Image: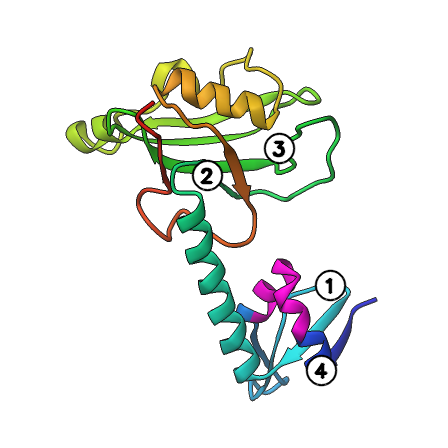
């Protein structure tokens, strides 16, 4: 059963340890009465919706911006993915634990690519929804550059593990990433054109 409560200062302090709660507060939305008159702002969360103040929203937005900058600074040469789907508990070792991930990156030669991967139809399988050569797309038009290396909807991709995702990007896109990071709460693909850049070697 859903309940609505005012967020106490003690509860609010959890935004520094819970990225999910921080985002709920930062993106709190307006609630109105039956006549359309403003009542308050509250989180879009379940089973508890938290009524929050403008100051709490602003503080949460500042904390989100701080963490966003930190993630980009700390992982600029890691294979950094944005978690786009729902997260889930690990089902096997090294599981990606997000149904859909995407990134925009530069390879070793400065070529720009976009890739979106996710869970396949079979348990633990991987799918590629998009593999786009952005340079070709910019040169030849929006409908060009898709299905780079025939990856989109290829039926025999390896198991959906972080290591396999890293190996796939390195081998198919001429990259030399050493580490992979999936960020589910701090960054978005609309934050910047290039999410990460491959080391030269």
- Secondary structure of the residue carrying tag 2 is strand
Q: Which of marks 3 and 1 is nearer the N terminus?
A: 1
Visible in this render: residue 7? no
Q: Which of marks 4 and 3 is nearer the N terminus?
A: 4
Q: What residue range appears in magenta?
A: 13-25
**How far is mark 2 from mark 4, CA to CA?**
35 Å
Side of 107 where 42 appears, left or right? right
- Secondary structure of the residue carrying tag 3 is loop
Q: Where is residue 26 in the image (x, y as percent from the top left)?
A: 54, 69
Q: Which residue occupies 57% across, 63% down?
A: 23
Disc marking residue 96? 3
- Secondary structure of the residue carrying tag 4 is loop
Q: Earlier in the sequence, mark 2 or mark 3?
A: 2
Q: Quarter holding the C terminus?
A: top left
Side of 82 where 131 appears, left or right? left
Of 178 and 195, which appears nearest the observer? Answer: 178
CB under 8 Å between callouts 2 and 4?
no
Residue under circle 2? 80
Q: Which of marks 2 and 4 is nearer the N terminus?
A: 4
Q: Which residue occupies 19% across, 33% down?
A: 138
Q: Which of marks 1 and 4 is nearer the N terminus?
A: 4
Q: In this view, does 187 lie above or below 181?
A: below
Could you classify mark 1 by the number of other residues whose Cα lies within 10 Å: few (under 14), some (14-19), or many (20 or more)? few
CB under 8 Å between callouts 2 and 3?
no
């Amino acid at each position: 059963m859903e309940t609505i409560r005012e967020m106490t200062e003690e509860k609010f302090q959890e935004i520094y340890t819970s990225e999910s709660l921080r985002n709920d507060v930062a993106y709190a939305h307006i609630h109105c009465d039956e006549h359309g008159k403003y009542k308050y702002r509250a989180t879009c969360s379940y089973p508890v919706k938290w009524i929050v103040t403008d100051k709490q929203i602003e503080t949460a937005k500042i904390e989100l911006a701080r963490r966003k900058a930190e993630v980009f600074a700390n992982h600029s040469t890691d294979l950094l993915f944005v978690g786009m789907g729902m997260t889930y508990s690990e089902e096997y070792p090294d599981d990606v634990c997000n149904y859909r991930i995407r990134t925009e990156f530069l390879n070793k030669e400065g070529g720009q690519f976009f890739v979106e991967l996710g869970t396949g139809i079979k348990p633990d399988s991987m799918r590629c929804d998009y593999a786009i050569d952005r340079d070709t797309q910019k040169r030849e038009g929006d409908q060009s550059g898709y299905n780079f290396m025939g990856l989109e909807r290829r039926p025999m991709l390896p198991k959906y593990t972080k290591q396999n995702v890293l190996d796939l990007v390195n081998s198919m896109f001429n990259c030399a990433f050493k580490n992979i990071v999936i960020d589910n709460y701090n960054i978005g693909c609309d934050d910047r054109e290039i999410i990460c850049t491959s080391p030269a070697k």
